[in-house]
């Protein structure tokens, strides 16, 4: 199929790396946290109909439109992503916006890291070695 018109614009606005933190590469979360992914998307010759969030090439969910686009600004879309220990590692998040004509645009990536958090310590207190 052939699509026409302008492609939508899309950008991940949260989470984004804070350049003032020690870690300059990604935003860090602990397994068990919920990552709130906020995206702006707009289409100059129509409307954005869907925003999907990806980790690399794998779709992780559809964002919900929480603020409608207006003539003066983009719409905001959100996905709350719960994390578990199976999510530990680096994620390369991107957002894919689709407009009402079928045009698609992909955002720049937003790297996030999920860690295990504090590791518990274990000590044997009995039996005591004499």
Image (cartoon, rainbow, N blue to C red):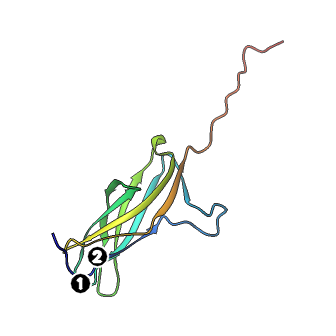
Q: Which residue is mark 2?
A: 68
Above-or-below relation of 111 to 76: above
Q: Residue at x 51, y 66 (%)?
A: 16
Q: In percent of the image, x 32 and y 55: which residue is there?
A: 61
Q: Where is the N terminus found, in terms of image quarters?
A: bottom left
Res. 64 image quadrant: bottom left
Residue pictured at 56% horizontal, 43% vertical: 116
| Furthest-bottom residue in this view | 72
Which of these two is toward me, 101 or 74? 101
Spatial CA distance of label 1 from label 2 is 15 Å
Disc marking residue 45? 1
Where residue 66 appears, as percent x and y from the top left, is 32, 69
| SS for dot 1 | loop
59 is higher (above) or lower (below) than 38: above
Give coordinates of residue 101: x percent, y percent.
Answer: 19, 75
Which image quadrant for residue 18?
Answer: bottom right
Q: Position of residue 91 (x, y in %)?
A: 47, 54
The residue depicted at 19 percent of the width and 75 percent of the height is 3
């Amino acid at each position: 199929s052939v699509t026409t018109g302008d492609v939508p614009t899309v950008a991940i606005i949260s989470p984004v790396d804070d350049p003032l933190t020690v870690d300059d590469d990604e935003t860090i979360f602990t397994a068990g946290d919920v990552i709130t992914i906020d995206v702006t998307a707009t289409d100059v010759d129509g409307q954005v109909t869907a925003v999907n969030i990806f980790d690399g090439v794998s779709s992780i969910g559809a964002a919900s439109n929480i603020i409608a686009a207006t003539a003066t600004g983009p719409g905001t879309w959100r996905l709350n992503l719960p994390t578990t220990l199976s999510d530990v590692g680096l994620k390369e998040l991107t957002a894919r916006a689709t407009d009402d004509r079928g045009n698609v645009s992909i955002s720049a990536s937003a790297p996030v890291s999920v860690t295990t958090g504090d590791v518990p310590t274990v000590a044997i207190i009995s039996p005591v070695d004499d």
